[in-house]
């Protein structure tokens, strides 16, 4: 199919476009005429003008009109052009030729629509019983004509429009396909059919034949279905085929970049369109939305003045003015202009959606819900309206309702991270944490637009107690440049990481994140406190190592210089390693596990010592365990040695027991020496005196 399309000569395409212009113009299908004329203008470089073409043009203008009906037809057509639809329909009510007959049916339908718009006082009442009754009468006539095979492709188009207005979408879809097969140049049939195609597979299953117009329809539907990459590829192929200068193709590419949220590229294309066609108002509302997102107030004001100067009664102009007042935070005036746009066109989708946004700004949730619902009635594929409904019910704390609407928005935009984040937040509020984590994870995989999915997933892991996963997520979030836009969340992540690594003992990484929090006024005091804690813990380790290497003698000076006055530091029990200078002692190892049991074993009777000395086995001293109290705790009774106990011992060792001068318990120092004989001369070395100083300290 694609090869057939690219092999179509542009001369033939231009002839078909001109013929379509003539046929649609005869029947009053002005929007199709406009589209076909723009496409034909884009092929201005293609020359097909010849003598035969000029002669055939006049003949085509009268095809489908009986000579006896010329006068009635031309008069009815003039009435139709000035929107006097009832007069036009009445004048050709008895016509039998195809063109006047279609004009009668189409004028009747337009008269019904005009009466509905004129009698509508409430924009929310799009469909009333009287309108359905009038459409039902037209439907009966068209169905009778269709059963007798008297409807051509244009009549089939009108039949499909009426079926669609009565919500008979399945039948309308079949009728539109038949209309396109009969009249492939009728662009209005493609436009009406596009909203009825809900899936890509359904689009590919449609059988239009092999006409090249199918390519424009497929590209159009891709954009409608938010299949942006496929749509851009299709329009790029059309430009390469020779339709590069067509305004419609360029504007559709701008819409594609808008839906893709490539705001700068979309604005650039719209500016090119404004230069090429400065009085064009089509899609100018989308252009104003882009300027609103970029907060370009000056450009929005210029665009609003320009649109008013061109046509102040176009719905697009009212929408531009509404956006201008919205960016100035004048929401009441914005709503007024959106309502004015809906007066001009009650099925203007952008106005319904934007008016819902304005009601949300005014905290009028009920009115916002009504606006979003009407937008959904106009186009069920408008994900913005579904998303707005979800937000409105979320404010009302009706989370199951919001979950339903967010799911529909996600189905329409499966690769939009905003829909996934909204789903995750709703699942989290419903205590379905695993579903929420899946949504946040998928939002990160598809490309987080707002850059908050990772933070929310980290926060949820933290609430669930999965601190390792939370730390990984916080680290990833803090490394993202987009996180800098939300300072509060960023510093929360830094502080959480600092506390996490401080608890794990990784003080360098903890200090790194804590120092970053010093830039935050809210987190500054907390970060300072954590940095002091880290510094004191580091100092405590240094003191412990020094105490072991110097024979467990901790001086008051060392403690005072390594700690802050306002911080308390608790040191755990340290066990001394086997000391070489006590390795040859004959003292038996202690059997008790309580503090001070090693000291008790040193005060055995002389008989026990002599008995131990007679054995050939040399005993080594078990490592001592010294408890350093936190708050100047006094020595226990087990660690207090009386003078009599020291004098009665016969061990040839000198013990010096001292306490800190600031301690409440100052023990006297007693020295006792005794000589013991040994049968083995080598034991003389064991009888050398040793000294050990044990200090009980407290750190304030």
Image (cartoon, helix red, strand yellow):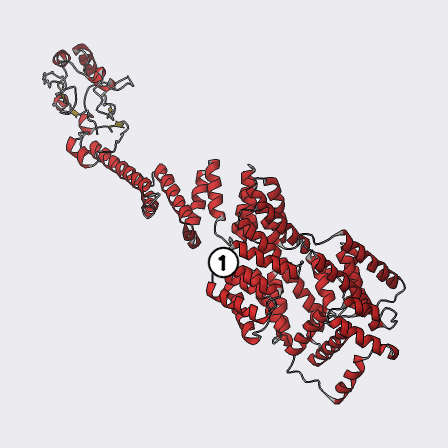
Element marked by disc 1? helix
Kindly indicate the quadrant of the structure image that contains residue 579.
Answer: top left
Q: Is residue 422 left or right of residue 171?
A: left
Q: Which residue is mark 1?
A: 327
Q: Identify the residue at horizontal 59%, vertical 46% (top origin).
A: 390
Above or below, 604 against 544 in this view is: above
Q: Nearer the viewer, residue 430 or 635?
A: 430
Q: Nearer the viewer, residue 356 or 225?
A: 356
Q: Is residue 389 visible?
A: no
> Residue 280's spot in the image, x, y percent?
59, 72
Quadrant placement of the C terminus: top left
97 to the left or right of 263: right
Q: Quadrant of residue 258?
A: bottom right
Single out the residue that lies furthest toward the bottom: 51
- Residue 329: x %, y % from top left: 49, 55
Looking at the rendering, in which quadrant would you find the N terminus?
bottom right
How many residues crowd mark 1 within 10 Å: few (<14), some (14–19), many (20+)?
Answer: some
Left or right: residue 211 versus residue 360 is: right
Q: Is residue 458 above or below residue 597?
A: below
- Residue at 48% x, 36% y: name it: 464
Q: Residue furthest right?
A: 148
Q: Position of residue 607 (x, y in %)?
A: 18, 10
Using the rendered image of the protein, determine whether residue 57 is visible from the camera's viewpoint: yes
Q: How many marks?
A: 1
**Residue 248 location, quadrant:** bottom right
In x, y percent, where is residue 400? 61, 40
Between 622 and 503, the one lying in front of the other is 503
Return the residue nearer the eye: 666 or 460. Answer: 460
Q: Residue at x 58, y 73 (%)?
A: 279
Left or right placement of residue 278 versus residue 692 in this view: right
């Amino acid at each position: 199919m694609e090869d057939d399309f690219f092999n179509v000569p542009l001369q033939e395409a231009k002839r078909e476009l001109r013929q379509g212009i003539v046929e649609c113009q005869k029947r009053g299908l002005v929007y199709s005429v406009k589209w076909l004329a723009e496409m034909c203008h884009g092929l201005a470089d293609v020359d097909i003008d010849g003598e035969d073409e000029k002669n055939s043009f006049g003949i085509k203008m009268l095809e489908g009109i009986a000579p006896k009906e010329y006068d009635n037809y031309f008069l009815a057509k003039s009435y139709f052009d000035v929107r006097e639809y009832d007069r036009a329909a009445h004048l050709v009510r008895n016509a039998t030729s195809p063109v006047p007959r279609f004009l009668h049916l189409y004028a009747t339908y337009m008269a019904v629509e005009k009466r509905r718009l004129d009698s509508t006082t409430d924009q929310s009442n799009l469909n009333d019983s009287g309108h359905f009754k009038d459409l039902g009468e037209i439907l009966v006539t068209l169905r009778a004509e269709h059963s007798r095979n008297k409807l051509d492709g244009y009549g089939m188009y009108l039949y499909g429009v009426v079926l669609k207005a009565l919500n008979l979408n399945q039948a309308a879809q079949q009728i539109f396909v038949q209309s396109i097969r009969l009249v492939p140049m009728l662009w209005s049939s493609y436009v009406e059919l596009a909203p009825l195609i809900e899936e890509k597979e359904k689009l590919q299953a449609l059988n239009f034949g092999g006409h090249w117009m199918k390519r424009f329809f497929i590209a159009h539907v891709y954009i409608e279905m938010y299949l942006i990459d496929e749509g851009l590829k299709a329009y790029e192929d059309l430009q390469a085929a020779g339709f590069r200068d067509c305004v419609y193709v360029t504007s559709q590419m701008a819409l594609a970049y808008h839906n893709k949220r490539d705001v700068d590229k979309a604005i650039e294309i719209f500016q090119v369109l404004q230069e090429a066609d400065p009085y064009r108002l089509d899609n100018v509302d989308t252009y104003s939305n882009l300027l609103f997102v970029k907060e370009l107030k000056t450009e929005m004001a210029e665009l609003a003045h320009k649109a008013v100067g061109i046509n102040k009664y176009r719905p697009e102009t009212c929408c531009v003015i509404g956006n201008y007042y919205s960016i100035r935070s004048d929401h009441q005036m914005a709503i007024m202009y959106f309502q004015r746009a809906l007066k001009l066109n009650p099925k203007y989708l952008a106005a319904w959606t934007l008016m819902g946004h304005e009601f949300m700004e005014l905290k009028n949730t009920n009115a916002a819900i009504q606006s979003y619902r009407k937008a959904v009635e106009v186009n069920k594929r408008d994900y913005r309206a579904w998303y707005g409904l979800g937000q409105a019910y979320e404010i009302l704390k009706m989370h199951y309702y919001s979950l339903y609407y967010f799911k529909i928005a996600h189905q329409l935009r499966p690769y939009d991270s905003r829909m996934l984040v909204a789903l995750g937040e709703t699942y989290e509020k419903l205590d379905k944490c695993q579903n929420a984590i899946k949504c946040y994870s998928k939002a990160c995989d598809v490309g987080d637009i707002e850059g908050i999915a990772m933070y929310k997933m980290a926060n949820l892991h933290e609430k669930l107690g999965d601190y390792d996963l939370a730390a990984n997520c916080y680290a990833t979030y803090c490394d993202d440049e987009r996180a800098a836009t939300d300072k509060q969340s960023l510093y929360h992540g830094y502080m959480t990481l600092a506390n996490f690594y401080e608890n794990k003992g990784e003080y360098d990484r903890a200090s790194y994140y804590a120092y970053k929090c010093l830039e935050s006024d809210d987190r500054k005091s907390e970060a300072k406190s954590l940095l002091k804690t880290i510094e004191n813990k580091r100092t405590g380790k240094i003191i412990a190592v020094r105490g072991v290497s110097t024979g467990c003698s901790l001086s008051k000076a060392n403690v005072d210089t390594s700690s802050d006055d306002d911080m308390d530091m608790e040191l755990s029990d340290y066990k001394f390693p086997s000391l070489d200078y006590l390795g040859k002692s004959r003292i038996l190892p202690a059997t008790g596990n309580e503090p001070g049991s090693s000291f008790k074993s040193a005060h055995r009777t002389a008989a026990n010592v002599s008995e131990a000395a007679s054995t050939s086995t040399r005993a080594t001293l078990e490592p001592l365990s010294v408890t350093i109290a936190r708050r100047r705790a006094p020595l226990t009774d087990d660690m207090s040695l009386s003078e009599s106990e020291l004098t009665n011992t016969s061990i040839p060792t000198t013990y010096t027991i001292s306490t800190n001068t600031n301690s409440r318990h100052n023990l006297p120092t007693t020295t006792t020496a005794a000589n013991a004989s040994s049968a083995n001369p080598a034991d003389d070395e064991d009888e050398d005196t040793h000294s050990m100083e044990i200090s009980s300290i407290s750190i304030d």
